[in-house]
Image (tube, helix red, strand yellow):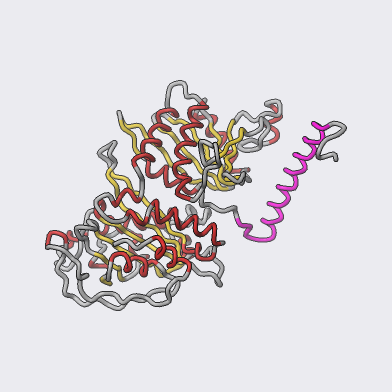
Amino acid sequence: MIISKKDFMELFVKPSSEVPKAATAPTPDLPDEAFSFEDSTPTEEPKVHPTAFVLNLLEKSYGNTQYLPREEIILGKDPSFKYLPKHVYFWDKIPTRPFFTLFLELEMDGAELLQEKLFKGKLDRFDDLQSALSRFVQMALDGFNHGGDQKKTEAKKGKPTETLCILSVSDHRQPPEAPSHLVCFGTVVPDPETSGLNLEVFFMDGASQYWDQPIREDYLTSLYEKHYKRLEGSQWQEAFITGIERKMAGKLLEICIAPHANEKKLEEAALDLMDEIAKNFGLRKSPNKARRLQTHELPEDHDIGIDSESKEKHGNRNPFKGISIRDDRNRLLGYIVYCLDNRKDAELLSNHLKNNNRFHNVLVIYPENNQARLELWQGKEKLEGKLTKQGKHFAGAGEVVNLLARFFVVSQAKAKDPKALAEELAYRARFLRKLALKQLMEEKTEGDLRD
């Protein structure tokens, strides 16, 4: 049975130093043979990192675990398997929890992981642990699905659609005095709109134990309500994407790929979906406001996606329209920039962002054939997602919802060295100088700034 929100939050605030003992036999509440495997083989005693909170969380919710050799759980020849731990925590499925659960704790930290051949030159530049963990979850689910193919009687096996895979890695982005883990929960969900299957994931950030109390409580409340408490019962996969989120994603696609796409309708559809996701991150509605997210049109001379020379050719106007997004306390969250005319404009915008962008949380939306493409830029790096039209149906909702969720959790870029810090500060100084001169020109002889 899933633990209460209070107990859930306490595990993050006061991570337990005592690690539960792994079971040497199946859990006592295992059901009939239809839902369980016979297993009398003693399991080894696990070695757990002192900062790992996930095993405590899972055992409090699901009962004692089995700690089994990986070759009894995950089989196959995928090159990523060599990075997985030698043992896996395993929970069988039961009537009230009709899915298998695997928990793997990587022995290397995030920095080592991103330097490995699978990711070097791709994800390591963006320091993108989330995508790396998602890749491993997918491979582990495939390996568990192939378990019985090796003709080993002790091997476990389960379909990806009936398996919850959890993977944890030590987060190298945290300072040594505040160690924590980043955790990925994943499964494969049948898409009701198509006959396809989608990998869906969500993340737990162990670093939240060090955050200020109001921020931590908002984050953990949304994490528990949106995701964790739903991980039981027949509707457990709704912990990853809800029906309303999928419906809103479909509406965004239809508007984006319409023959004469309407900018205002596109903006409204994108904001509706983002607002639905925002409530999972503790964002509140202001009184008399329709949404949690507040928007303001970007000025005609904004600097996102264009250089000064090109802007001068357009009469000091930026051809790429967009909005800034703020929360109920008027704090800037990011931007949406959209280009609806043609693929060429989208390529120009992407090329400029790749070479020159200094802004963070820039969401770009544009149509491409029967797809709605979304790019989330953090400085000069991007994550991508797409909604794809397939006859009367569409695919990709889970990927896009996960991408948009990153909009609310990504932090500002950290300067890696004094030179990078100086460049960032110099850029902001030049930007403020330009704004001040513009305001002085508008005020002419008197005004707030001149005063």
Q: Tell me, yes or no, whether the highlighted magenta stretch contains residue 438.
A: yes
Which quarter of the picture shows residue 401? top left
Q: Nearer the viewer, residue 286 or 39?
A: 286
In the picture, which quadrant includes the C terminus?
Answer: top right
287 w.r.t. 413: above or below: above
Q: Residue at x 58, y 42 (%)?
A: 326
- Residue 68 at least partly seen: no
x, y percent for residue 250: 38, 34
x, y percent for residue 327: 57, 44
x, y percent for residue 69: 26, 71
- In the rendered image, the residue lying farthest to the left is 33
- Does 436 sit left or right of 162 as displayed? right
Q: Nearer the viewer, residue 126 or 212?
A: 212
Q: Nearer the viewer, residue 31 or 47?
A: 31
384 w.r.t. 344: above or below: below
In the picture, which quadrant includes the N terminus?
Answer: bottom left
Q: Residue at x 56, y 53 (%)?
A: 411
Q: Residue at x 70, y 35 (%)?
A: 308
- Does 83 sit left or right of 72 as displayed? right
- In the rendered image, the residue lying farthest to the top is 260
- Does 446 sit left or right of 391 as displayed? right
- In the rendered image, the residue lying farthest to the front is 287
169 w.r.t. 380: above or below: below
Q: Residue at x 39, y 40 (%)?
A: 245
- Residue 191 at least partly seen: yes
Which quarter of the picture shows residue 5? bottom left
x, y percent for residue 231: 31, 56
Q: Tell me, yes or no, whether the highlighted magenta stretch contains residue 413.
A: no
Residue segment shown in magenta: 414-443
428 w.r.t. 215: above or below: above
Magenta segment main secondary structure:
helix
